Image (tube, rainbow, N blue to C red):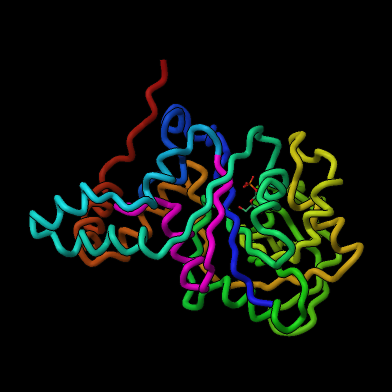
Amino acid sequence: MVVRKAVLPVAGWGTRFLPATKAMPKEMFPIIDKPVIQFIVEECLSANIENVIFVTGRHKRPIEHHFDINTDLEKHLEQCGKTDLLRNIMEISRLINPIYIRQKEQLGLGHAVLVAEPVVGYEPFVVALGDIIVRDNKNILERMMEVYNRFGKSVIAVFEVDRKDVSKYGIIYGRHIEKDIYIIDDLIEKPKPKEAPSNLAIVGRYLFTPRIFEKLKVTPPGKGGEIQLTDAIKLLIEDEAVYAIKIDAKVYDTGTPLGYIQTVLDFALHRDDLREDLILYLKQLLSSSIPQIDTV
Ligand code: G1P
């Protein structure tokens, strides 16, 4: 069955970025000149996803505006002869077919995915987290779809992390069946390094059979009192196989201040118009004394 729909949970408060996120969704933070969420939408579109379903909250309206057609702005850019910019802003709003659905209460990632059930229906679908950007030569969602087409079961993307970082992620334990592919035997959300069954961390890209909804409905609150998607997957593996695909991509977590700064820097270093001046600036910065934190 073709995977046509992607669910992007974007309702979170973004508390790690307050006060910036009081009125501005963290998913709209710019990576230089493109908001984080657009990278994820582009990833979905290039994997031929037809419907992008945003699970949003009350302070997330800028995301909806961003993917609308803005005729006033388009007219203005046309009149100024800014054709490159015009093409740029026209493209994404013409390609995307968005659906917005509200998560009325923020009860966790698992709950956010469950909110999308009436729109997804009984078919396989992708979940792509709204603050994780993946940079890879091959579209990761397409690779996951290939695995899904072979086995007809859910597929979760994982990557290797340092042992000291396992408590930031959902961690899987799997049986290696072939190059980069595992059958998952166990998962645990944000374990202590001592408790982690491996260093294979969930990236934030999932492809689910619709049976995940049955499991989400009976998943009790877990880590942090929230309904965790990882816990629902743990229930799903009792009934049907769930595969993991290990990717070797660069994974950017823009949802933390350090991760966000690293993302902006990395993307800037890959841009011809910024690279040289930025390297010069960084060299100067690092050769001068590192600023001290003022203490009272
Ligand atoms: C979520 C998931 C976690 C996954 C992570 C990827 O956690 O619950 O399993 O590894 O995304 O970034 P969050 O970072 O939203 O707390």
Say left or right for 284 vs 156. Answer: left
Say left or right for 96 vs 273. Answer: right
Q: Quadrant of residue 2?
A: bottom right
The quadrant of the picture occupied by the N terminus is: bottom right
Q: Is residue 250 magenta?
A: no
Please name the residue shown 43% across and 52% down the image.
36
Say left or right for 201 vs 186. Answer: left
* Residue stretch rendered in magenta on the structure: 31-56
Judge by depth and name the residue closer to the eye, 122 or 201.
122
Which residue of the protein is positioned furthest toward the top in this rendering? Answer: 296
Q: Residue 81 at what x, y percent from top left?
A: 9, 60
Q: Residue 20 at what x, y percent from top left?
A: 41, 31
Judge by depth and name the residue closer to the eye, 137 or 91.
91
Which residue of the protein is positioned furthest toward the right in this rendering? Answer: 238
Q: Residue 17 at what x, y percent from top left?
A: 48, 34
The quadrant of the picture occupied by the C terminus is: top left
Q: Is residue 31 visible?
A: no
